[in-house]
Image (cartoon, helix red, strand yellow):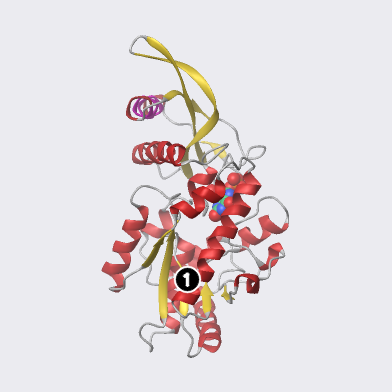
Amino acid sequence: MERFEPKKFITRKIQNLRSQASGKRIIVAVSGGIDSMVCFEIARKATIKQEGQTIPFIIDTGLMRQNEVKQIEEYFRKKYNIELQRWDKQNDFISALKGIISPEEKRKTFRDVFYRIMSQAMRSYAADLLVQGTILSDIVETQKGIKTHFNVLHEAGINPANYGLNLFEPLKELTKSRVKMVAKNLDIPPKFLRIQPFPGPGFALRITGEVTYERVEKIRKATEIVESELMSPKIFQGFPVLLTDKATGIQNESAFVGDIIAIRIVESKDSLTARSYRIPWIKLDKIAKRILTEIPGIARVLYDVTPKPPGTIEFV
Ligand code: XMP
């Protein structure tokens, strides 16, 4: 493998963007993850001479973690003194996902809603170029038919022009570890290097079966509990999943039929393989008790011990 030089990569991408974006307005699709933060830094540097040329933009899908969008907005305010543009589109996503059970259908539906909204945003801000943080593994997994990543169009056989979009995807040729190397050479705080990967379609993938407001709220609360209890640097990703099946529980001395939540915590280097994290029993017990007492309607908590392969990291 040739030696990767992050500084040269950054210079090259800034030059590419300058030549494509001269005199044009740019929107950067922000998600709060490291890939889109690297894209924003590259775009910001490329357009530094023209204030307002680069607009950071986020779609609140309603499928993100508690307060996540707020925290990203605050970050942009504090660090850049820029107002992150936010469109609240929870209803669009939840209503489009109604009745969909198949994981691939969920991903494709999410993708379509996402780009239709992006297309409206481009027109509304009179922008000509959309910068997005698609990385190599998103493209490879989509092309191989493993998983349709929502942020891959061209390689999935979809012409971005169908959505009226002109894309700039500076990280397309990079693996996650190279994105991190690039981030270390940009003005990006180290906390972005440590945050857990969170899929673009968010809670749509943390719920088996149908996505509804009520089910999203349950998994959002469970996610807050699991994330607040997990500290080990060994953990690559740790999250709960709301299952479709039901189980019997007891409450106030009478039986009830409630939901089942599975907890998946994995160790992994690159997400290609993973093993179930050997969580201390006392910790697991605490997480289970909190889920069962703090979230109404949960009857059972399970721990997933499946390695990847044969399991994938996500359930959906
Ligand atoms: P799997 O489930 O394929 O996950 O073992 C590997 C890594 O990819 C993330 N992942 C996704 N990220 N859109 C995303 O943005 C998706 O559709 C998606 N599916 C999986 C997963 O969280 C893990 O880090």
- Residue 101, above or below 105: above
Frontmost residue, 227 versus 249: 249
Q: Is residue 18 above or below residue 252?
A: below
Residue farthest to the top, as pictured: 253
* Quadrant of residue 224 within the rendered picture: top left
Look at 32% across and 67% down and name the residue there: 76
The magenta stretch spans which residues? 284-291
Which quarter of the rendered picture does the N terminus lie within?
bottom right
Secondary structure of the residue carrying tag 1 is helix
> In the picture, which quadrant includes the C terminus?
top right
Which residue is identified by label 1? 121
Q: Which SS does the magenta portion mostly show?
A: helix
Confirm if mark 1 falls within 8 A of ligand 1: no
Q: Position of residue 122 (x, y in %)?
A: 49, 74
Where residue 10 appears, as percent x and y from the top left, is 50, 77
> What's the amino acid at mark 1?
Ala
Position of residue 264 measured from the top left corner of the image (x, y, whole percent): 50, 36
Badge 1: few (under 14), some or many (20 or more) residues near its Cα, within 10 Å? Answer: some
Residue 253, image x, y percentages: 35, 9
Query: In screen coordinates, is 45 left or right of 100?
Result: left
Q: Residue at x 32, y 63 (%)?
A: 73
Residue 241 appears in the picture as rendered: yes
- The verdict on residue 87 being magenta is no
Left or right of 97 in this view: 213: left
Camera-nearest residue between 56 and 141: 56
The correct choice, above or below, for 181 with respect to 216 in the image is below
289 in magenta: yes
Q: Nearer the viewer, residue 295 or 254?
A: 254
Which residue is at 32% across, 57% downward? 70
Q: Residue at x 61, y 59 (%)?
A: 138
